[in-house]
Image: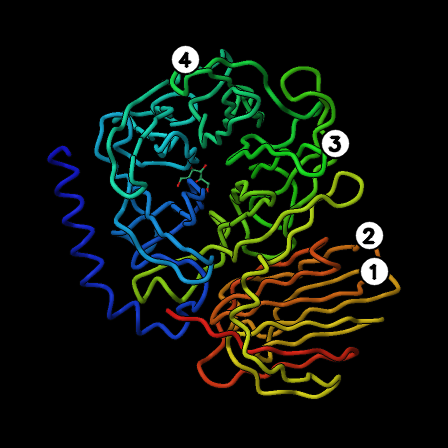
Amino acid sequence: MNALHRDLKRLVDRVEAADAPRVAADPHRQRYHIQPAVGWLNDPNGLCKIGQDYHVFYQYGPFDPNGGVKHWGHLRSRDLLHWERLPVMLYPDAPYDCHGVYSGSALWEEGTLFLYYTGNVKYAGDYDYIRAGRGHNLCLATSRDGVTLDTKQCLMTNADYPAGLSCHVRDPKVWKQDGRYYMVLGARTLENRGEVLVLQSTDRLHWTHINTLTTREPFGYMWECPDLFELGGQWYLAVSPQGIDCPNVYGCGYFPVYGDWRGEYTLGDFHPLDMGYDFYAPQSFADGDRRLQFGWMAMPDAPCTTPDAAFGWNHCLTVPRVLTAGPGGTLRQNPAPELAALRSPAALSLPGGETVSGPACFDLTAAPQGDFTLTLAGGLQLRYEEAARTCTLRFTDPAIAYGRSGERSARLTAPCRSLRVLGDASSVEIFLNDGATVFTTRYFPAPGPRPIRLDGAVGLLYQLNGEE
Ligand code: FRU
């Protein structure tokens, strides 16, 4: 442990203790979603299972609810419902990561946790920090108990990446397959095109660039947080592209990959993963036979805000979602089945056309047969029109939106026959047609009972028992 590490650790402990009462006083503090103890949270990182325990790391800015230099926060859970906070795993305490321990992923093997991440360095001077002035280093940290850091080192610097790239090369996602290790890295070229580098290794330390994945036509200037995985025989490349034409500031979705991503391939159509206001930089991992995904429930650089920063914290992750293959190279996302254990034993029936006083944390299900409108907290509306097969989310009360303006609309590929909505103190996740279309948003209703109204369908409403 170096001296900076020791002092940063003390400072984090101090700020977490000092700000805890202010954070706890926030009525919009979530009950069953992962959120930072204090300060800022962004991308999920290092998702993995060690023995029977799930580990979630996240981009953590403990000193500033509006950002600050990034650390890796850490949580552990047996059941995906109750999360134990563990000490910060990675601090920005080395010359190769001193301006932020940026996003990355985990490999658990031979009794060691290997954490691959990007060390962000900004050099002092008059730079654009895109083509010059920035180091994005590929770094590796190890831990034998999954909680305490043993080693940390820099494996590659910008000089080791292929020619033609800007300084923006980050977010390693690593996995093992057929006795080899593979990595995808998000990149921005000098021509401002987004792409993904594929690297290969036999020893986890030395990595060789073997391919580059991109679209035939340029699609945005940077692809952040790549994820490459197979489900039901189909490969998918998930990315968060910046600079594409989309309803939010940045995009977030996936391409089906046809052919061989190690050689000749083509990327199919880009599908957004989420149609709401707040979803970015998801990461997935294999949990036995299933694939689980967490996303960041926010959108970087967006004009919208939250009231939470005034209480000393900001942002949360989505619930864990199971990814499955849908028809025609599509993906489905559904809440992990574990979440049903939070349901109250008895469900309240939600009669069509009546307003019910609902709990803040709920799990609503319905099987609509035609047009319906769901209105939450009197100001967040989801409207489905069967004739156009269109679903639209909008805030009718700007007081609960904190700048989330304009409608978000999705055309469904089939008539809407299933609806599931997970509500927490300040978020809503909506799953339509068995997770074929998803809308995620934060919302900030005033404290007190929350009206829930479903017009055009009959629903079942479970109260959810969260903890925080
Ligand atoms: C995505 C991102 C990543 C980066 C991290 C820094 O939200 O910009 O590309 O590694 O956040 O916090």
Q: Position of residue 124 (x, y in %)?
A: 25, 27
Q: Residue at x 51, y 14 (%)?
A: 209
Q: CA distance from mark 1 to mark 3?
A: 23 Å
Q: Is residue 66 above or below residue 4?
A: below
Question: Where in the figure is residue 399, as x and y percent of width and height?
Answer: 51, 74
Mark 1 closeness class: few <14, some 14–19, many ≥20 residues within 10 Å: some
Residue type, numbered disc 2: Thr
- Marked residue nearer the N-terminal end (1 or 3): 3
Q: Where does label 3 land, which residue?
A: 268
Residue under pointer 4 = 160
Could you give the CA–CA distance between mark 4 and mark 2, rounded to whole angstroms?
44 Å
The mark nearer the N terminus, 4 or 1, is 4
Q: Which comes before the other along the chain, label 1 or label 2?
A: 1
Q: Pick the quarter of the image with the N terminus.
A: top left
| Label 3 crowd (10 A; few <14 / some 14-19 / many >=20) | some
Identify residue for label 1: 389
**Marks 4 and 1, Cα distance to the nearest angstrom?**
49 Å
The amino acid type, in three-letter code, at marker 3 is: Gly
Q: Find out whether the residues at labels 1 and 2 contact each other: C-beta distance under 8 Å.
A: yes
Which numbered mark, 1 or 2, is in the foreground of this view? 2
Kindly state the secondary structure of the residue where label 4 is placed. Answer: helix
